[in-house]
Image (cartoon, rainbow, N blue to C red):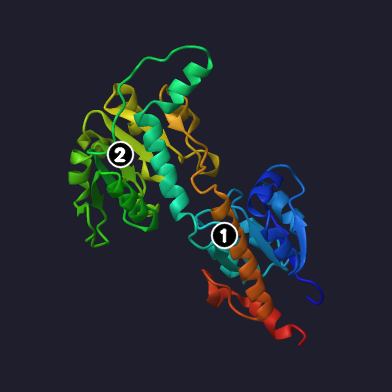
Amino acid sequence: MDGALRIFLAHNPEDREVYYGRALAHLKALGEVRFNPLDRDLTTAEFVEAAKGCQIIVSHRSPPAEAALFDGLPELMAYFRCALDVRTVDIAAASRNGVLVANAGISFIDATAEMALALMLAVCRDVVESTVEYRAGRVPPSNMGLQLAGSTAGVIGFGAVGSRLAEILVSLGMKVLVSDPFKTIDRPGMIQVDLDTLLRESDFVLPLAIANETTENLIGAREIALMKKGVVFVNVSRGNLIDEAALEAAYRSGHIAKLALDVGRAADQRPSPQLASLPGVAATPHLGGLTPANADAQAMSSVEQTRAVLAGRMPERALNADCAVRLKEFWKNRRP
């Protein structure tokens, strides 16, 4: 393993430009950087072929890191996911092969909270539908909009994004209900309630819980039935939290009056096309974290992790440090 560190940057060209405009020069200063040769995300077989001989992979969130990736790259010692979510990374397979896995820091809080607010305003004031109609030379109907001030917002999950969004909504004059069984909430303008109470009393429902096995389909037919008729539903967290069939049925029936989505169960966690195609739905293709500040911060986290490798330090946010056998061998065998 003498010579320059070999780093494979798996981002497709579009994502590479978005994320690594500034960070790429820093990454190149740390080793030989090789690129995804295609204009799209790689399949696992293509990923293995393109990354052969590389010691570090820096990957966007889109291509999964399956067992075959770690099994097929005997020189790989670290996989850095340029995102927080590692659910599509086979960490057990990485550990079995002695490969370190680490993810990016939490830098998308403000961007995602602001995206939720943007979608709330878009559907409450018919911004998307009215813009399309007026641009086409038609005067849209003068529909009465929904006002945020004085309305009740229900925030499910009081993590980084949920707590930030709740602060914003309080500042706009909304009554904010929060449901999170793992947190104690004692902040001005926020009222902690159980989930069923939140669903019954909220004019706006915003699921922001962590997506895992216990929260799969957290919002299903039973939960939707508890919501007010005419509720506004906005999801910028994860599609896995929602039973999409129940959500579609409730929207078609009018029980959910307004629907806005930045995430879903389609590729790259985008909203499902079937939901996105429904009239009046505001659906954006997982854009919540796409701001220059967040993209740069996530890219620079992989630079710092690579820098740590060269300095003989365990990178921050390592998820299986005890299994990083190849990295430890690299440090042991590296020339002074």
* Image point (55%, 57%), residue name: 89
66 sits to left or right of 288: right
Give coordinates of residue 45: x percent, y percent. 70, 50
Which one is nearer the viewer's eye here, 286 or 333?
A: 286
Label 2 SS: loop
Residue in view at x 26 percent, y 62 percent:
183
Whether residue 244 is visible here, answered yes or no, is: no
CA separation, marks 1 and 2?
A: 35 Å
Q: Disc 1 vs disc 2: Cβ atoms closer than 8 Å?
A: no
- Disc 1 marks which residue? 297
Q: Is residue 120 above or below residue 303?
A: above
The residue lying furthest to the bottom in this view is 336
What residue sits 48% from the left and 54% below the top? Answer: 108
**Where is residue 202 shown, x and y percent of the image?**
22, 40
Res 175 → quadrant: top left
* Residue positioned most to the right: 3
- Which tag, 1 or 2, sits closer to the chain's start? 2
Quadrant of residue 297 in the image?
bottom right
Residue type pointed to by label 2? Gly
Element on which disc 1 rests: helix
The amino acid type of the residue labelled 1 equals: Ala
Task: Name the residue that disc number 2 marks.
Answer: 220
Looking at the image, residue 253 lies above or below residue 99? above
Q: Residue at x 68, y 49 (%)?
A: 17
Q: Residues within 10 Å of mark 2 (few under 14, many from 20)?
A: some
The label shown at residue 284 is: none
User: Is residue 140 left or right of 302 when viewed as pictured?
Assistant: left
